[in-house]
């Protein structure tokens, strides 16, 4: 603001620009030297001179006294001011000595005006003012060179007065630019509102996808850690098995080596003794004195009495050699069979770990459900089972829960269904209603199910139905529960297994398996409507 006030004081009243080489008249007013010279020249023939500011008259041409202080101030001011032409790009058309930013443009004059020149500009109606613009020609009709003042609604173009009277738009409906622009701004606001809503929806979708991507990354990271841990365990167990087998081979080798060494030492002693006896007999054979030869004991006495049976002894040695000829490969093979156990353990680690049986609870079974003796199968039947009415028994819909509660961990169970009929299978809270309309699984916020109706399959929770587009030909399904993660997944046990849907929530109660084998009067009863629990287990990984 201070800079603007200072600029006002440094403007020449003739050119309306900052002083350049300012000079002062005797009256005390200052002007640019060039500006006052041109002014005084126009007065040379009039016989008198006057000040353009205060109109004080001079008989002779007044002397121009240079105002050094004002010159210095003007120079410093120009140095400290930014280049307005670079900032706005539109400068006053009349400030030729120095660029001054324009504040308005006159469409009639096709000129841009600064504050000073705007004050002295004509106020007549034909001088239409607008925001500063360099393309003033665009605001005029290209045919009649008149200002565009109206809007042709038929052709959706801006026109001048002549276009509407004698031009090609004669007879067309016209509106003022203000009214037409108001309508267009209203439409644009509606479009803007729709775009804003769409942008917010897109933003939410991006956030949702980002969440799913992070979840997928977390799952992938968890699976990678699980597989890494699995292979580390496999390598550890294989290393342990290798060490045990090699240690057993080494132990057997040492035992056999000691046994053979003892036998070899014994045989070496026998060999030396036999050599000594053979040498003595050879000496007797070489003697010529008959008396000496006859006085020696018989040759049979020279042999060891314990070795009387030479052939049998040899046979004994052969049998002993046969006994120590090799290692006990049966023991080694038995240890190597542990590999099969390791492989079985790996499969168990991938698929199932330990039994976790699911048995149906007759105390919850509807009276039109026959429960098999093994508590695995629920069959729709027209015959009432005459069970007592209790608070835990389903009274309206033919449903039954299992006995076991799932409160943590990862579990799965498989079910086989009849290929006809209307049935539902899923999980529910124990607090589910047993008597009212809200007791039907899937039609409340306490149960989740896969439903088959009219050969169509759907996923249902809290009365929200998600139709499955898959062509399901299998009659076996898997329900997988990850309690801590809040995920309940359903799979079609075809080849290969196909994921159908996953419900995601935060479980607040224990969960029970629940079956529904429904009947309708037009369908009738029949033992072809049934559900059977096949197997179940506890998993140490996520099936998805």
Image: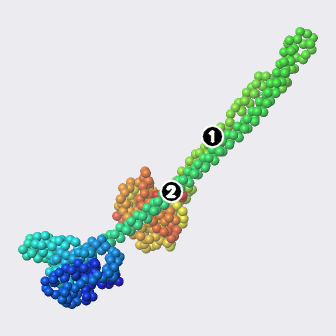
Looking at the image, residue 92 sits to the left or right of residue 427; the answer is left
In the orientation shown, which residue stands out farthest toward the left?
166
* Percent position of residue 452, x then y: 39, 61
Q: Taking 439 as reference, is 1 above or below it?
A: below
Residue 304: name its quadrant: top right
**Helix, strand or loop at mark 1:** helix
Looking at the image, residue 94 sits to the left or right of residue 475; the answer is left
Residue at x-position 21% and y-position 80% = 37
Q: Taking 22 as reference, is 276 above or below it?
A: above
Pointer 1 residue: 333
Q: Taking 27 as reference, is 176 above or below it?
A: above
Residue 305 visible in the shown view: yes
Pointer 2 residue: 223
Q: CA distance from mark 2 to mark 1?
A: 35 Å
Q: Nearer the viewer, mark 2 or mark 1?
A: 2
Residue at x-position 69% and y-position 40% = 250
* Percent position of residue 459, x then y: 40, 63
Mark 1 burial class by Cα count in 10 Å: few <14, some 14-19, many 20+: few
Q: For this rendering, which residue is in front, 200 or 520? A: 200
Label whose residue precedes the other's in the sequence (2 or 1): 2
* Percent position of residue 96, x then y: 23, 75
Mark 2 burial class by Cα count in 10 Å: few <14, some 14-19, many 20+: some
Residue at x-position 47% and y-position 71% = 432
* Percent position of residue 17, x then y: 26, 79
């Amino acid at each position: 603001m201070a800079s603007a006030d200072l600029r006002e004081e440094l403007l020449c009243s003739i050119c309306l620009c900052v002083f350049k080489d300012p000079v002062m008249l005797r009256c005390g007013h200052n002007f640019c030297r060039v500006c006052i010279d041109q002014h005084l020249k126009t007065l040379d023939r009039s016989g008198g001179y006057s000040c353009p500011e205060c109109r004080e008259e001079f008989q002779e041409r007044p002397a121009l006294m240079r105002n050094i202080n004002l010159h210095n101030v003007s120079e410093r001011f120009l140095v400290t001011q930014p280049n307005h032409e670079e900032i706005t790009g539109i400068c006053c058309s009349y400030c030729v000595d120095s660029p001054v930013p324009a504040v308005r443009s006159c469409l009639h004059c096709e000129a841009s005006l600064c504050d000073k020149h705007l004050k002295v500009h004509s106020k007549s109606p034909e001088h239409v003012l607008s925001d500063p613009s360099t393309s003033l020609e665009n605001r005029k009709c290209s045919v009649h060179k008149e200002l565009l003042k109206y809007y042709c609604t038929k052709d959706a173009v801006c026109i001048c007065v002549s276009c509407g009277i004698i031009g090609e738009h004669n007879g067309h409906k016209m509106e003022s630019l203000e009214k037409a622009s108001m309508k267009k701004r209203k439409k644009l606001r509606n479009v803007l509102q729709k775009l804003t809503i769409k942008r917010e929806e897109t933003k939410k979708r991006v956030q949702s996808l980002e969440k799913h991507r992070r979840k997928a990354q977390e799952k992938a990271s968890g699976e990678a850690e699980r597989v890494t841990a699995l292979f580390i365990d496999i390598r550890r167990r294989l290393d342990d098995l290798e060490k045990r087998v090699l240690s057993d081979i080494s132990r057997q080798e040492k035992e056999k080596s000691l046994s053979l060494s003892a036998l070899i030492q014994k045989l070496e002693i026998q060999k030396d003794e036999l050599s000594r006896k053979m040498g003595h007999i050879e000496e007797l054979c070489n003697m010529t004195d008959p008396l000496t030869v006859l006085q020696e004991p018989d040759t049979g006495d020279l042999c060891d009495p314990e070795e009387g049976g030479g052939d049998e002894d040899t046979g004994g040695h052969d049998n002993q050699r046969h006994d120590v000829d090799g290692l006990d490969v049966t023991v080694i093979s038995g240890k190597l069979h542990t590999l099969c156990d390791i492989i079985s353990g790996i499969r168990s680690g991938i698929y199932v770990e330990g039994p976790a049986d699911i048995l149906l609870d007759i105390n919850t079974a509807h009276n039109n459900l026959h429960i098999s003796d093994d508590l695995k199968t629920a069959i729709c039947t027209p015959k009432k089972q005459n069970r007592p009415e209790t608070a835990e028994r389903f009274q309206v819909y033919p449903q039954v829960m299992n006995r076991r509660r799932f409160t943590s961990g990862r579990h799965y169970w498989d079910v086989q269904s009849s290929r006809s009929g209307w049935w539902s299978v899923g999980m529910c809270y124990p607090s589910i209603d047993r008597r009212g309309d809200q007791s039907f699984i899937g039609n409340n916020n306490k149960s989740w199910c896969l439903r088959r109706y009219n050969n169509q399959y759907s996923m249902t929770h809290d009365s929200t139905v998600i139709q499955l587009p898959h062509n399901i030909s299998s009659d076996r399904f898997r329900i997988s529960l990850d309690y801590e993660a809040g995920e309940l997944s359903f799979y079609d046990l075809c080849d290969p297994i196909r994921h159908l849907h996953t419900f995601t929530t935060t479980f607040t109660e224990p969960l029970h398996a629940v079956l529904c084998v429904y009947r309708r009067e037009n369908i009738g009863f029949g033992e072809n409507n049934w559900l059977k629990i096949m197997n179940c287990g506890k998993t140490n990984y996520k099936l998805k």
